[in-house]
Each structure stands twice: as C-alpha cells, then as structure tokens.
Image (cartoon, rainbow, N blue to C red):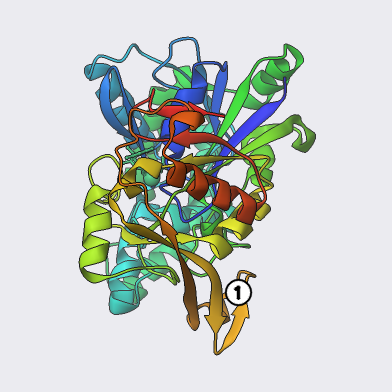
Amino acid sequence: MGVTAIVGANWGDEGKGKITDYLAEQSDIVVRFQGGNNAGHTIINDYGKFALHLLPSGVFYSHITNILGPGVALNIPFFLEELSNLVARGVPAPSIRISNRAQVILPYHISLDEYEEERLADQQFGSTKCGIAPFYSDKYLKVGIQVADLFNEKYLRNRLEKSLVIKNILFEHLYNKPKISIDELLPVLLKDGERIKPYVCDTVSLLQNALKENKKILLEGQLGTLRDPDHGIYPYSTSSSPLAGFGSIGAGVPPYSITRIIAVVKAYSSCVGAGPFVSEIFDESANELRERGGSSGEYGATTGRPRRVGWFDVVATRYGCLMQGATEIALSLLDVLSYLDEIPICMSYDINGSITGDFPLSVQLDKAKPVLKKMPGWKTDISGVRSFEELPKNAKTYVENIEKLIEIPVKWISVGPKRNAMIKR
Ligand code: GDP
Ligand code: MG
C-alpha cells in the first residue's frame, strides 16, 4: 500500500489538518513525525470545530491508530489536556500511541523559550513559546530526555543532572531567573511518565508490522517547506524538518515506503510570525483577505496572532513542492479568492533589477520584490462545488495555471473548511 505524506508547501497553515482529516477516513494509521504543540491544525467536522495542536488529525475516527512518532516534541501535560478536551466535547476516545523514543518537552524548555524571547526584545523570531527551539537544541546537544527514560528514576536523575548544570548557569546569570531544583523536577516527570504509560509503545515495530499487513498509513507534517531549518527561510525557520523526507526518520518508516507525497498548497499566501515574505500585501487589501481567509479569518490557530497575508507565490510554492518531493498537490482555500475582480499572483522575484524564478537564499531574500501578474477572478461562490467541471471558467483557469507553473498535478481542491468541501480530480 505504501505510505502517504501530507505536508505543507508554503509557510504552514495551508490546511493540512483538513486534508488529513478528510483522507484519514480511508486510512488505518495517522502519524505526526515532527514538531510539537506549536502546530495548529483546524478541523471542522460533525463533532464541531477543533484546533489540534499535538494530536494527529486522525483522532476523529475510531478505526484509526494515531501515532506520535520519535521525531515529535512531546509536551505531556499538554497532550493529556488536549486529549481530555477532545473527549469532553463528545469525540469518542481515540486510539493513540506514543513512541518510546519520542523526546519530552521539559518545563525548563518552555521557560528558556520565554526568557530568550524576552531577552531578544524587538529582535524576536516570533516563537510560539512552546519550548520547541530549546527542546530540539537539547536533543541535538544530547541532553534530551526520551519517553522511555521517564520509567527509570536513576537513569532519569542522571540525565537531568547533566543537563541542569548548563541550564542553571543560564537561568541565574544570563536571564536572572530562579534556578531549577532537580528534586522538584524529578517527581513531576516521573508522574508524567506514569500518566502517559498506557499510550507508550514501540511505534516503529507497530509501523513495520502495519506495512507488512498493507495498512494505509498517513504521515502528517506540521508547518511547511519554508520553515525547514535547511531548506527554508533560516533563521525564521522551525527547529525540526517539516519535509516529507524527514517523515521517514521522524516516524520511523523506510524512505522507500513513502510513495505518495501530497503537498498542501494554499491558493494565496499566509505566514505567521516574523521573516521575509515576498508576496505580502498590506493595508485594506490585506485586511480584507485576512478577514475572508481560513474558516474565520487568518489568525494563528496556536497563538491567535493575525497572520500576514499575500498573493499566491509561484517562486516559493514551486520550490516548496520541489523540496517536499510532491507527487500531487492539494490546493486549499480556493473559495476564499471568490470576492476578487482580479487575482494577482507572484510570478518571479526582482532582486536589484535581476529577475529570478529560483527561491533565493536568506541573505538575498530581503531584497526580493514580487513581480505580479493579474488573473481574472470568478466572482461566484464556489463553496458548494464538488466537481472540477462545475467550477467557473476563470477558477478552472486559475487552478490549471498553477498546475502548469508548478508542474505537479492538482489532485484535490478544497473549497471550504468543512470536511466534505472538497473536489477530487
Ligand atoms: P494547517 O496548520 O495546515 O492544518 O492549517 P490551519 O488549520 O492552521 O489553517 C487553515 C485555515 O483554513 C483554518 O482556519 C481552516 O479551517 C481553514 N480551511 C482549510 N481549508 C479551507 C478551505 O478550503 N476553504 C476555507 N475557506 N477555509 C479552509
Ligand atoms: Mg496551522
């Protein structure tokens, strides 16, 4: 059967949650493979409207096994609360498995994130302050804590002691904040371990067996290509790779098992937080697009911050899809553009008078100006349309134009936030 990855081709918030929820019906397993509760995936279905942060978007189906893979940043109290809120709203308790190799966001990761943004003041990166960057820094510094460590007090104490030496120097002398006491922290973590124990297992074996049994597996990415630490707009990137290629590592499946890569592409652009954003628009036209965008305006599902918005960016999206290795595109939020007489799209970048279609390095990106072309609008409500043929001519042309420019087939077109507002081609 193979594995399907659903990933973002832009800056995140492309509607991955909706597409994953839609495709999950036909699947057996949904895996989150990177990031943590800094994600915000909005899903609207028969149970209501939800913004999932850490839970995989398969949690609304009782036939699905939802996995938090080894690559995920696990905030345990957050996980438990998100799960109980879901059940409190009438969703049947989902089946969830947490990798025993996943690492844990510790309380001091969150403090470090907050203190560092405070220290940076107006130089901030726009962190969601969930502790994600300090968490992944510790992982690669080799002072992180794996889920399995929570079940061995002696080992855990030893690991924490190593980490806290440096942390406490930072807390005391850089940030002027209280130090962390291991004797206070250890019991909290042991208790967290007990609370998640029923969910913990060797998810890698589970997935290997599922592959043997030809089960349908979805990998759900967080954010999008342009936030990738290697291939994105570094340093305005996130701390784990949102690329399908990393899905193999973060979930623990063979690279060759990922045979289908659905890049979710937004019909316009949005970007939350700081960083270069070439096709950004401002003032009244931006306010209008922001208010009409998403399911109730473009506001961060995690932070509530107003999202920056802009026109469709061919340069960024072509690059975004290429780096994902997209085999098909799910074009989302097309319905949002229905109010426009003309729809500008950014065809290329002008960098000091030289025109390029290649996505620039960070050092040049600030200088890039969008080269726009106007497409005719369709001025018709398309949210009820369920087949490509039924779309107004200009909407079809808009989609076909994107397909031609990106050179990847648009297989899905999302025309509304609800589960069934989808056109399959
Ligand atoms: P994700 O992080 O990629 O899952 O995306 P978000 O959920 O953060 O942001 C996407 C926003 O668009 C949410 O408000 C969704 O409810 C909404 N949405 C998703 N698909 C569509 C669509 O086709 N049309 C409209 N109007 N809204 C959509
Ligand atoms: Mg989001």
Q: What is the x, y in percent for residue 225?
A: 56, 54
Asked if 79 appears above or below 376 in the picture, the reply is: above
Q: Residue at x 72, y 11 (%)?
A: 213
Picture quadrant of residue 1: top right
Q: Residue at x 55, y 16 (%)?
A: 26
Q: What is the x, y in percent for residue 242?
A: 56, 49
Q: Quadrant of ligand 1?
A: top left
Asked if 132 appears above or below 46 in the picture, the reply is: below
* Residue 347 left/right relative to 51: right
- Give the camera-side residue of 244 and 115: 244
Q: Is residue 187 visible?
A: no
Residue designated by label 1: 360
* Residue 131 left/right relative to 408: left
Structural crowding at the residue carrying mark 1, measured as other residues with C-alpha within 10 Å and reported as few (<14), some (14–19) or many (≥20): some
Please state the total of marks drawn on the protein image.
1
Q: Residue at x 55, y 61 (%)?
A: 314
Asked if 384 appears above or below 160 in the picture, the reply is: above
Give the residue type that dot 1 points to.
Pro
Q: Residue at x 22, y 42 (%)?
A: 296
